[in-house]
Amino acid sequence: MGSWSRFNIASIVLGFGFLYLPIVLLVIFSFNESKLVTVWAGFSTKWYAQLWHNQALLDAAWVTIRVALLSATCATVLGTLAALALVRYTRFRGRMLFSGMVYAPLVMPEVITGLSLLLLFVAIGLDRGFWTITLAHITFTMCFVAVVVQSRLLSFDQSIEEAALDLGATPVRTFFAITLPVIAPAVFSGWVLAFTLSLDDLVISSFTTGPGATTLPMKIYSQVRLGVTPEINAICTILIGIVAIGVVVASIVTKQREAQREKDERAAFAQ
Amino acid sequence: MERVASALFSRLVIIIPYAWLLFFFLIPFFIVFRISLSQTAVAMPPYRPVFDLFGGLSGIMEKAREFSLDNYVWLTEDVLYFNAYVSSVIIAGISTILTLMIAYPIAYGMAKAPKSIRPTLLMLVILPFWTSFLIRVYAWIAILKPEGLLNQFLMSINVIDQPLIILNTNWAIYIGIVYSYLPFMVLPIYSSLEKMDHTLTEAALDLGCTPFSAFWRVTFPLSLAGVVAGCLLVFIPAVGEFVIPDLLGGSETLMIGKTLWNEFNANRDWPVSSAVATILLLILVIPIVFFQNAQAKADGEGR
């Protein structure tokens, strides 16, 4: 498509600068000696050391990680099923409603989702806490998983599935032997996405939590309201580091799997 | 036996996620609506009437009589709520246009980039989305403060001699929304530009179009599907945004997400928060349906 003009390069550089500069500044000032986050006073890691003595913060981090692991796993199963239902079964009763319910949570303001789930939990008499946060997170993250898996399912060659069925494999067996291995990278990135969304969520967790279950974003939020401190920068830097490592590992794994799959496919055709 | 198993399998694939979403996504809206018709009470749960399914039909009828539209009347009487709805829609609208203006050149540049580096650029756009929303909004506080990094920088290069007051104004909210939602706008526009048949633009240029009119009359209309999807992905959640107006906005900033949060957490008024949420949902239902149709259409094309 034409040439890559100076204007194109400039807009990309400026755009990416805008996207990354705030995060880079935040990371830099987490190593600031001074308590002021805007005046540089020398390198120090003391804010990180302080984090280890903040028991409330560590507890919150532990709750957050457990919620994220559990909810991402359940959301991946449900989201993958939802994607299969949308792509493989183009006609069933109430499909319109179903696809609406899959897409709507993607854009639904979090205050509405949070409030409505809370009122549901109260109505059915569920004790609020760890489990209600987890259920709420499963519900909104499964839709993101569904969209990620769905796009993979749409681009995949269905004839290999049909071949398996023709050769006498049951749909269940076909799913586990053919479909799942092919869509596995998408399922995996769906899981990672669900995990980070859960790790990150403030509004829905705040609505659906009960006494005793405080997540890390809730803790960060209540501290941010009191003012900007290097300690918060330090927590944020650790979280960014975890996510960055996760994403890089995920993309390497995905690339390797894709390469392996292509190699296998070529080998299969060569025979 | 096998046949039964496979029929069961295909049923379950549909039924399990369907039932989950019905129970945890759709039914809660009806509960919200019902509670919006209730009255506040000093109790747990803090509203009445509380439905009791075991009260029999007459019991339900009795309680149904206690329902009223009082909360909605209250919302229309207090101009604060009306202003909050209007200013949320305006702020979200302005932010959406600003996001589009910044995102389009980025997406365009990415689509024009050499094929070999496109996946890397795509990755770089998606990456900030994976880092915490709260953290990204928080990062702007230190930048926009009166004694913050932006003012320090501008004053050191002598562009200004008085610090700009940006934090706690609507400008900070625009910056926050544009920044947080930028990837949602870039990605759909990029994917529609990348799929485009570029010989069309070349034809327009060969036939004597100026580059600008070739862009405006050929490229832009062809990318409209991506533009619409991006705008909806930004606008709808931005109307109900809570974190950004709360952390970056000022005390005079009215946004409905913040109003709902305060009504719920500070005033503990569940029925009024439910009424606020119901009206917000009614405002958003048209753009949401629009979004779903666009999404379903895009899936159809992918087939």
Image (cartoon, rainbow, N blue to C red):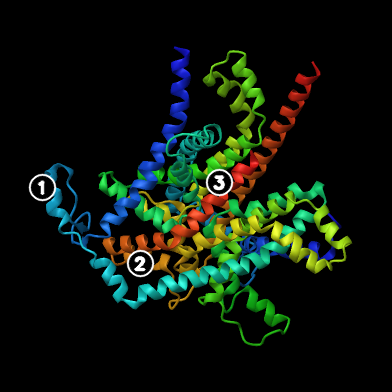
- Residue bearing mark 2: B262
Percent coordinates x, y for residue A214 in the rendering: 39, 52
Q: What residue type is labelled 2?
A: Asn
Which SS class for mark 2? helix
- In the picture, the quarter occupied by the C terminus of chain A is top right
Does label 1 or label 3 sit earlier along the sequence?
A: 1
Local SS, label 1 = helix
Pointer 1: what residue?
A: B58
**Does label 2 or label 1 sit earlier along the sequence?**
1
Along the horizontal axis of the image, is B41 left or right of A84?
left
When the figure is inspected, residue A195 is found, relative to residue B97, above or below; the finding is above
Q: Can residue A227 be seen in this view?
A: no
What amino acid type is highlighted by mark number 3? Answer: Ala
Q: Do labels 2 and 1 share a chain?
A: yes
CA gap, disc 2 to disc 3?
36 Å
Other-residue count near label 2 (Cα within 10 Å), few / some / many at <14 / 14–19 / ≥20: some
Question: What residue is drawn where x is 66% and y is 36%?
Answer: A155
Does residue B21 show up? yes
As measured in the structure, the alpha-carbon distance from the residue carrying label 1 to the one carrying label 3 is 44 Å
Residue marked by disc 3: B296
Answer left or right for B292 relative to A18.
left
Circle 3 crowding by C-alpha within 10 Å: few under 14, some 14–19, many from 20: some
**Camera-side mark, 2 or 3:** 3
